[in-house]
Image (tube, rainbow, N blue to C red):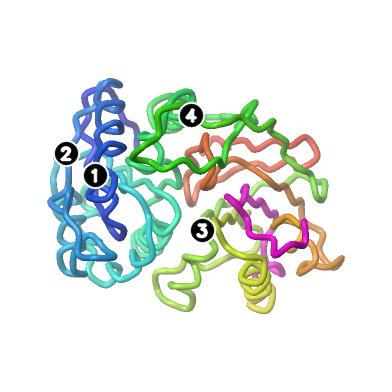
Amino acid sequence: MRLKKGDTIGVFSPSTPITKFCPKRHARAKEFLEGKGFKIKEGKLTGKSDYYRSGSIEERAEELNELIRDPEVRCIMSAIGGMNSNSLLPYIDYKAFEKDPKVIIGYSDVTAILMGIYAKTGIKTYYGPAFVASFGEMEPYNEMTYRYFEDILMDDNKGYVYEMPEFWTEEFIDWETQEREKDRNKNEWLTLKEGTVEGRLIIGNLNTMGGIWGSPYMPEIKDGDILFIEDSLCDIATVERSFAHLKVSGFFDRIGGLIIGKHELFKDGGTGRRSYEVLQEVLGNDYDFPFLAEVDCCHTHPMFTMELGSTIRLDAGKKQIAVINE
C-alpha cells in the first residue's frame, strides 16, 4: 500500500482524548500534514472526551469503523495511544478492512489494534507516528519523523535501510506551552549480540501486548521471527516482569532476532541501569540470536515507520536494519 500527496488521512482517537486535552498541539499536527499535501478527515470523537477516554467503547469502535469503510480515506492514523485500545478489538469491522485495505498506523497502546488487524486479516499494519503525538512536535523532530513516514509509505522502499538518526530526544515539555525545540542527545545504537538474520518483523509496545496476550488478536510468534519491543515511562520492576513474561512464555526460544527501542524516561529505581540491561539479565547467557538495542522506533523523537509483518534483515554487528524485497 502506497500513499500519495492529496490522499486523505483519517484520524481516530482509540483511547486518550488528546485532541480535547491538547488543542494547540492537535492544530499544529493538522497544519503540518496539510502542509505536506494531505487532506485530513477527523474522526467524530475529535475534540471530545469521556474523562479518561475519548468516548465509550461503542463510540470509539464506530469512529474507527467509519474511517475503515470510507473509500476516500487511504490512511488511518491514531491521534495518540493511551490504555484502552484493546477494548475495541471485538468490534472492529475486519471484513470491511479486508475489502478495502488501507494504511493504518500508530504506536504505543495502538499496538493492540495494529496487531489485532494483522492477526485477523493477515494485512500488514504500520508501527509509526501518531497524529498529535508525533506530527504536533516542533522542528526538527516532526520533519525527521515525517521523512521516515514518507520513505516507507510514499517512496519505493525496496531494499530500504534504516539509518541511525544523528540525534534524538526524550525531553518532556508541556505540550500546550511548548514554544521551542526539544534538546538533542547524541544517538548510539548498541550491539548486544552480533549476527545477521532475516525474518518476519513483529513490532509493538510490550506493556500493551499484555492486554492481548493469549487472545485471537495477538499474532503468533513463529520460529525465526524478529521481535522488536519498546516501552515508555515504566519503572524497572515493571520492565523486569514484562521481560520475564516473554521468557517464561517461550518467546525467546522461537525468535531469530531481537531489537529493543529506546525507553522514554525510564524509571531505573536508583539503580543507574538501562532497560536493555534488565533484558540482558532476564535472557541470561542461553541465547544465540542477534540483539540490537536503543533503536528509534519508539516513544522518543524522531520515530521510524516500520511495517508489522514485513520481512527485514537485521545485522546487529553492523547496527543495520533493512527492508527485504518481497
Distance between the alpha carbons at the discs numbered 2 and 4: 23 Å
Distance between the alpha carbons at the discs numbered 1 and 2: 6 Å
Determine which of the numbered discs, if any, sits on residue 11 in the image. Answer: 1
Q: Is residue 28 above or below residue 269?
A: above
Give the magenta range: 251-272
Report crowding for label 4: few under 14, some 14 to 19, many 20 or more residues within 10 A (C-alpha). Answer: many
Write down the quadrant of residue 22 in the picture.
Answer: top left
Question: Of callouts 2 and 4, which one flags the residue occurring earlier in the amino acid sequence?
Answer: 2
Residue at x 41%, y 59% (from the top left corner): 109
**Front residue (pair 304, 158):** 304
Answer left or right for 127 relative to 222.
left
Distance between the alpha carbons at the discs numbered 4 and 1: 20 Å
Residue wearing tag 3? 205
Question: Of callouts 2 and 3, which one flags the residue occurring earlier in the amino acid sequence?
Answer: 2
Question: Of callouts 3 and 1, which one flags the residue occurring earlier in the amino acid sequence?
Answer: 1
Residue wearing tag 4? 141
Can the viewer see residue 275 in this picture? Answer: yes
Q: Residue 148 placed where, x, y %?
A: 48, 30
Circles 4 and 1, Cβ within 8 Å, touching? The answer is: no
Residue at x 42%, y 41% (from the top left corner): 129
Q: What residue type is labelled 3?
A: Asn
Circles 1 and 2, Cβ within 8 Å, touching? The answer is: yes
Q: Is residue 232 above or below residue 150?
A: below
